[in-house]
Every structure is written in structure tokens, then in C-alpha cells.
Image (cartoon, coloured by chain):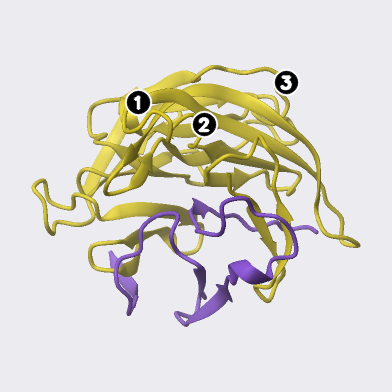
Chain colours: A purple, B yellow
Amino acid sequence: MKQLYDFPYGRVLQRTGTTIMDAAPDGSITTFAQIDATKLPGPCPGGVGLTTALTVLRTG
Amino acid sequence: MGCLLVRDNSGNVVETFSDPMINGPWDMTDSEDGAHLLVTNVLNGTVAANGAVANQGAILRIDLAVSRARMPQIKSITGIASGFSERTDPAALVIGPTGVGLSPACRVEDENDRALYVVDSLNNRIAAILNPLQRTHLAGTGLTVSTGGSLNDPVGLTVASEGQILVVNGNDGFITEITPRRKQLAKMLLDNTGGPPPGNGTLFGVTFDPQRGVLFVDDGSKTLNSLN
């Protein structure tokens, strides 16, 4: 087992986060996205709070 | 309630998917061609139940139009499974169908024999929804792939390249390997802190990368880790 990254934040509950981190194969970690709920291009009823419903489309 | 946010390669939100059928999207996976999203929903009747169990957790398939020329568009949304147990929880906000993973196709270009594995957390079981990419009617809560044994409030799930199902628990720090033939093959303690039992509440997100093995987050130590 190998630790890849130590997040410098407090614990964040499911459905409350707004940040996505990018852990690259070379070991570097960067912020990929910081969601601003006031600047969305469309509706999101109830506001923004991220869950593990996350995937990457290879096309489109 | 809630939506799916579509981001470009730079992380910018370029589109939102919202629909009355999307209600508390909790976990998601996709078909490799990007044409189908498979999403768990945990808010159907959950808040109204006020802490009691509501058996209305649902799995949706969102069929997309994808191309290199334009952003993905929803073609249709189909309910493929329903009746999963869910309830609000003071520590986890909501407990319900969480981890999802798509089995590899047994035969190339034959999508009919695939299964969508779903973590049924409150019933301590792993379910399989058959033919998830084509089915047009509800499968209920699916077939039981595994229950009990090393499972202890399973939350996160991923499928390795050979089809093994890897599940992490919410109530302890164990990961369990389950074969496609439904046998719990092995378990390993990933986090031994806190508790009792050790690792309680530390595991959640898990995924499989062919180059790096099993990647998982540990909420207890706030770390991202790999396991070969």
C-alpha cells in the first residue's frame, strides 16, 4: 500500500464539496475544478455539493 | 434535486444535466464509449421519511448523444432498477445505493451479457442489474451477488480489468474482493485507525487503474493511496 497524497484539508462530507483534484500518474496533484454554484451555465436544483458520481467521457 | 455537471478538459462547467428523474445523484459510472451514464439516486422519498428507511432508491441510465463536434446531449433517461433502501444519516447525510461498477463484456462487442454491480449499503449486499445498457424495464433491486461475510456497510465499489469486484466498507477499514462467480475471495484491512471497529468511517471512494492498481481515498487520514 502506498500513500500518494495527503490532503491538507479537514474532512469533507459527501454532497458538500465543491473541489475536484487531479492526481496525475507522475505523482503530482493539482486542483482540476473549483465549482462556483452562482456561475453555472444551466439549472442545478438544490445547489451544488459534489458526490462520488464522477466519471470521464472519452468522447465528446 | 441535484444535477450532473459537465466539465471540459480544463475543469470549467460547460453544461448541466437536470431532470425530475435525477434526484440525489450519489454515484455514477459510464460505458466505455461514453454513450451511457449509470447513476444511483438516493433522494426519492428519503427526506420525507425523516430518518426512517425509504425503499425508493433508484438506478438510472442516461443515454447520451456524443460526438467530437459538440457537447454531450441527453437522448433519454430510463429507470433500470428501483426499490433500494435509503435513509438520512447524521454522519453520512444519506445512506443508500452508492458504489456502482460495470462488468467487462464476456465477448467483444456483445453488450448484452454485462452487469451493473450496485452497492446496497443498508442491506449489506452487492446487487447485479443485468443488461443495464439495453434494458427498458425495471429490474427491482437486482440479483444478489454477495451478502454478509466481509461486507460491513459496503459503500465504494469498482471493477478490476479481469472482472473482480472490489468493495470497501463504511463500518470498518476492509476491502473485499469478490469474483464474478459471486465468491468472496479475499479481504484486506486498508485503515486500522479509530473505531471500534478499526477503520470505521474512513473508506469511501475507490477506483481501479490498470497501471496503478486500486486507488482509494482514506477520509480518516485524508490521503489518496494505491494498492497493487
Residue located at (59% from left, 38% from top):
B104
- According to the image, label 2 marks what residue? B44
* Residue at the extreme left: B196
- Pinpoint the chain carrying mark 1: B
The percent position of residue B176, horizontal first and vertical second, equals 30, 40
Circle 2 packing at 10 Å, graded few (<14), some (14-19), many (20+), is many
Residue located at (70% from left, 56% from top):
A57
Counting labels gives 3
- Based on the displayed image, in which of its 4 quarters is residue A8 positioned? bottom left
Foreground: disc 3 or disc 2: 2
* Secondary structure beneath label 3: loop
Work out whether mark 3 precedes mark 2 in sequence or the reverse, and give the earlier one: 2
* Secondary structure beneath label 2: loop
Q: Amino acid at mark 2?
A: Asn
* Secondary structure beneath label 1: loop
Q: Amino acid at mark 3?
A: Thr
- Based on the displayed image, in which of its 4 quarters is residue B70 positioned? bottom right
Measure the C-alpha gap from mark 3 to mark 2: 20 Å
Q: Which mark is residue B206?
A: none
Work out whether mark 2 precedes mark 1 in sequence or the reverse, and give the earlier one: 2
Q: Amino acid at mark 1?
A: Val
- According to the image, label 3 marks what residue? B136
Q: Is residue B217 above or below residue B178?
A: below
The percent position of residue B67, horizontal first and vertical second, equals 87, 55
Circle 1 packing at 10 Å, graded few (<14), some (14-19), many (20+), is some
Work out whether mark 3 precedes mark 1 in sequence or the reverse, and give the earlier one: 1
Q: Which mark is residue B53?
A: 1
Q: Is residue B193 above or below residue A7?
A: above
- Pinpoint the chain carrying mark 2: B
Position of B14 with respect to B99 (left or right) is: right
